[in-house]
Image (cartoon, rainbow, N blue to C red):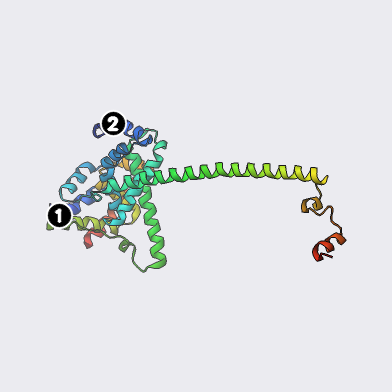
Amino acid sequence: MNISQIKQLMISSLNPDADTNMVSGKLKEAGITYNFSPDFKDKVLDKLFTASSKINREVEFVKYMNFAFYRVALTGVAAIVVLLISIFFMEGSLSLNSFLGLSDNYNESIVCLLTGK
Amino acid sequence: MINESYVVAEEKELVNASLSGDKRAFGEIVSRYQRMVARTVKGMLGDSVFAEDIGQEVFIKLFYSLKEFRGESKLSTYIQKIAVNLTLNEIKRRKRFFSMFSQKANNEMFEFEIADNDTEERKEASEIVNKALLAMDPKFRIILTMRMLQGYSTKETAEILELPIGTVLSRLSRAQEQLRNILIKL
């Protein structure tokens, strides 16, 4: 097929009632073909299935992190509650001084404590 | 369980198997439709390595949107729509990029490669077709690609491009006029 025939085919493919299957078939015969590289399918599958397994690993990691966070948070809250209860029983109140362990200290005793006199 | 006869499997079977994560079933879909996607993507963007990346994106997008495919249209039409959308988006992206960073003309944004093992006659034919395609306005180029390379009728072209038939008919006539002017110069 010469160049002018190819040009004519191209133009005729844009006629509303053109036999477009015939046009595309003739162009294929003339060497107008398109394809991807031979390993195209493998590249697509690698991207998809490697990516999805990576995503799965990430999702599992986040799930375990959430689980670990709840365990640590619950343990922490329980420890704080035990500490508050013990302070209350030892000091008789939950004031700031009780928290800081200053309830029985007077200025004089602090001076004694610090100077040793 | 992996089906050994996916080569002759029905579309629906392939879609269902792919949805359950069957790599071989989706591989069969890629094998069946990669030439069709190549015609659209390379016809629109030129026969370059960048077009291959868009081709891969088409199948990756297909994989993640398979659950939305209800089987009301053919799988090929569904894939073709994805290919057209991604290709047109890529053209817009390149236009933005080139308008900001390059002085190249619109038709220089695309390039094509011609196979070395072709005869001179086939190489020349390929060069004429690709040059003409890439010189066209993208909205006409997509019409020419659908008709000339894919062999779609006016109705099928309208369905894939999601345009009214009247719009496609008017674009056909304007595209033909533009193509004539381009081919005179080639």
Residue A15 appears in view: no
- Read off the residue under disc 2: B3
User: Residue B135 lies in what quarter of the image?
Assistant: bottom left
SS under mark 2 = loop
Q: Quadrant of the C terminus of chain B?
A: bottom left
Q: Nearer the viewer, residue A77 or B112?
A: A77
Residue B52 drawn above or below residue A73: below
For marks 1 and 2, give the one nearer the viewer.
2
The chain under label 2 reads B
Q: Foreground: A116 or A28?
A: A116
Crowdedness near tag 1: few (<14), some (14–19) or many (≥20) residues, C-alpha within 10 Å: many
C-alpha span from label 1 to label 2: 40 Å
- In this view, the residue farthest toward the bottom is B103
**Cβ atoms at labels 1 and 2 below 8 Å apart:** no
Dot 1 corresponds to which residue?
Answer: B122
Q: Chain of mark 1?
A: B
| Residue A67: percent from left, percent from top | 55, 41
Circle 2 crowding by C-alpha within 10 Å: few under 14, some 14–19, many from 20:
few
Q: Which residue extends farthest front?
A: A117
Above/below status of B145 relative to B14: below
At x 24%, y 34%, the residue is B7
- Asked if badges 1 and 2 are on one and the same chain, I answer yes
> Residue A87: where, in percent of width, then height?
77, 46
Q: Nearer the viewer, residue B131 or A50?
A: A50
Q: Is residue B159 left or right of residue B150?
A: right
The residue lying at 30 percent from left, 51 percent from top is: B41
Question: Label 1 sits on what residue type?
Answer: Arg
Query: x, y percentage for residue A60?
Result: 47, 42
